[in-house]
Amino acid sequence: QVQLVESGGGLVQAGGSLRLSCAVSGRTFSNYFMAWFRQAPGKEREFVASIQWSGGSTYYADSVKGRFTISRDNANDTVYLQMASLKSEDTAVYFCAADRDPRPETNPREYDYWGQGAQVTVSS
């Protein structure tokens, strides 16, 4: 069983930066795809970014491309989401997720494991 624990959420002003962390533990996940999703009140969960744990290939939603960066630290089993130039529309609960299928997916139904979520609030 894989456990995912997010941290680093909070309140930030528009234009500011924030970094989310996702600590991963449990069974080996060398071929997994790790991703960040977000869900704003009254909206569906949406894909933000993903990274192939072994090869490091990254994918981004158009809405965050150029502002957010996903990365992983193999030694510490942690995935990060560095967020910059934040906008009020980035306000949401951000979830870390893991997919055992080593192919890039943007559909949250394809992901097998989820963290509890971290609130990010951007004030304008």
Image (tube, rainbow, N blue to C red):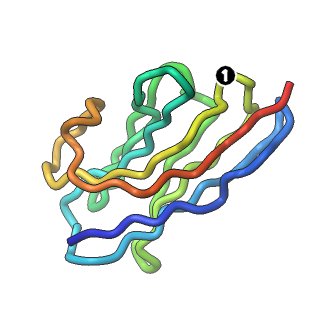
Question: Residue beneath label 1, please?
Answer: 89
How many residues crowd around disc 1 within 10 Å: few (fewer than 14), some, or many (20 or more)?
A: few
Report helix, strand or loop for mark 1: helix
| Residue at 46%, 47% in the rendered image | 95
Image quadrant containing the C terminus = top right
User: How many dots with numbers?
Assistant: 1
Q: Position of residue 113 (x, y in %)?
A: 27, 56
For the point 67% across and 22% down, the residue is 89
Q: Quadrant of the N terminus?
A: bottom left
Q: Say which residue appears at 53% left-offset and 57% top-offset.
A: 80
Q: Position of residue 77 (x, y in %)?
A: 41, 73
In-image side of 82 versus 47 (left or right):
right
Amino acid type assigned to the residue bearing label 1 in the image: Glu
In this rendering, the answer to whether 28 lies above or below 5 is below
The correct choice, above or below, for 63 with respect to 3 in the image is above
The residue nearer to you, when weighing 14 against 1, is: 1
In this rendering, the answer to whether 83 lies above or below 47 is below
In the picture, residue 60 is in which quadrant? top left
Quick check: 65 left or right of 25?
right
Name the spot of residue 96 as percent of width and height, x first.
Answer: 42, 52
Could you tell whether 98 is left or right of 90 in the image?
Answer: left
Front residue (pair 121, 103): 121
Query: Residue drawn at (41%, 57%), measured in percent from left and top?
Result: 115
Residue 80 vs residue 9: left or right? left
Residue 2 location (% of width, % of height): 26, 69
State the residue lying farthest toward the left: 101
